[in-house]
Amino acid sequence: MRLTQYFLPTLREDPSEAQIISHRLMLRAGMMKQSAAGIYTWLPLGHAVLKKIEQIVREEQNKAGAVELLMPTLQSAELWRESGRYDDYGKEMLRITDRHERDLLYGPTNEELITDVFRSSVKSYKDLPLHLYHIQWKFRDEVRPRFGVMRGREFLMKDNYSFDLDFESAKRSYNNMFVAYLRTFQRMGIKTIPMKAETGPIGGDLSHEFILLADTGESEVFCHSDLLDLDVLASDIDYDDVQSIARIIDQYTSLYAATSDMHDAEAFNRNVPSDKQLSARGIEVGQVFYFGTKYSEAMGAKVTGPGGEQVAVEMGSYGIGVSRLVGAIIEASHDEAGIIWPEAVAPFDIGLINLKSGDSDTDRACEDLHAKLQNAGKAVLYDDTDDRAGAKFSVMDLIGLPKQLIVGPRGLKNGSVEIKDRKTGAREELSLDAALNKLTT
Ligand code: ATP
Ligand code: MG
């Protein structure tokens, strides 16, 4: 992609409305633009990252046996009256009336809708367990939308719903999602810590929030620091192997971790050696929740059990903040010059910098490298503008592509170009072939 043909409206100045670094950097890097409070247009660079994150979420959901569908953003109020939540939800729900005076709402979540989908087609225990998910925009009329996409009003969420015959099976569904979440986040280059979360009136300990540690996080958290060293991608995963899944859950839940709502200072001090006590701030990027028969009872989602009896299905729901993750990853990965994208979510793999656009040798070398890298399957953003070299360097650092390939007339005289690693800042001078080789293998 040539920068002269792309749309990258970067800002030179720090936008005054942004309070935290990810919001500032997303605006400066031309990733998004606010269209109303808490509602954003995703510009091409931001959109590319959003899609990368969405795809990793999708792959790990599918791998864990969940099946994708797509429910609408607008829902009928009727379903929410059945569950009793139409009145309970309060002002966060955006309520809409259509031309026939029917009540609609912009979905803040989808338990009711999915339960309706389920009850109209699934009648037998033989069709269980079932995991359905979608990746769809939500609307919550937050009192104080802030921090850019981290607390928006319109935001993209992956929400998954599990249906099981009994508690044992529901617990397996929960455990599978728990592990799928660890894998999902680690693939994005971030480490999250599952922390016990409040379950409301249902009780039990079957809810966890997945927290990314960052100074600007809204939650205060406490945990054993060894949790940060666990590596869930070290071995392959088999979701049918109940024991090995349980072992992973055990590894993560046997060490202390809690948000301030659930924190027990006495237990923390008793169970965690003082040099391992980590108290920090964190961002909730996902939550898993088992809630039993709350919706299936209220809405009559029942199946025929093995003995012919009618059983209300056991349910769970599992959310990931796809659009929040874009900001959260930046909070965890940036420096004073800008964003540092982990490779898996970078909008392009390589930024190609032409130090002297208009110089025929340099242009030719850049065109050639651009074509060869693209042929090798690399996503390249080629800065072919006639901006000054200094300005090009700052834009590339700002937008945070993992590698920069720097090409200028002086180096080309000796047949060499430079590769810069955005994360370490290390620069290396190489021949054209060696550079290509390095960037494509
Ligand atoms: P929070 O406590 O941050 O308000 P929540 O617990 O109400 O979030 P859930 O219902 O658990 O949110 O939604 C699942 C995920 O959706 C959250 O873990 C979070 O990552 C994301 N999310 C929730 N609210 C927002 C929002 N206003 N803007 C962006 N992402 C959000
Ligand atoms: Mg939550």
Image (spheres, rainbow, N blue to C red):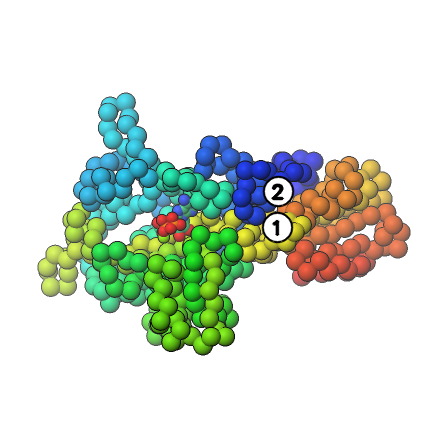
Which residue is found at the position 53% from the left and 44% from the top?
19
Q: Quadrant of the N terminus?
A: top right
C-alpha distance separating marks 1 and 2: 9 Å
Assess mark 1: CB under 8 A from ligand 1? no
Q: Position of residue 436 (x, y in %)?
A: 73, 56
Residue 312's quadrant in the figure? bottom left
Residue 234 vs residue 194: left or right?
Answer: right
Q: Position of residue 291 (x, y in %)?
A: 25, 57
Residue 98 vs residue 12: left or right?
Answer: left
**Residue type at the position of mark 1:** Ile
Tell me the crowding category of disc 2: few under 14, some 14 to 19, or many 20 or more residues within 10 angstroms, Cα based. many
Name the one closer to the observer, 65 or 318: 318
Which residue is found at the position 50% from the left and 42% from the top?
148
Name the one closer to the observer, 225 or 155: 225
Tell me the crowding category of disc 1: few under 14, some 14 to 19, or many 20 or more residues within 10 angstroms, Cα based. many
Tell me: residue 431, above or below residue 104.
below
Q: Quadrant of the C terminus?
A: bottom right
Q: Mark 2 — residue? A: 29
SS class of the residue under badge 1?
Answer: strand
Name the one closer to the observer, 393 or 258: 258
**Residue type at the position of mark 2:** Ala
Q: Are marks 1 and 2 in contact (CB under 8 Å)?
A: yes
Q: Position of residue 179 (x, y in %)?
A: 40, 64
Q: Mark 1 — residue? A: 339
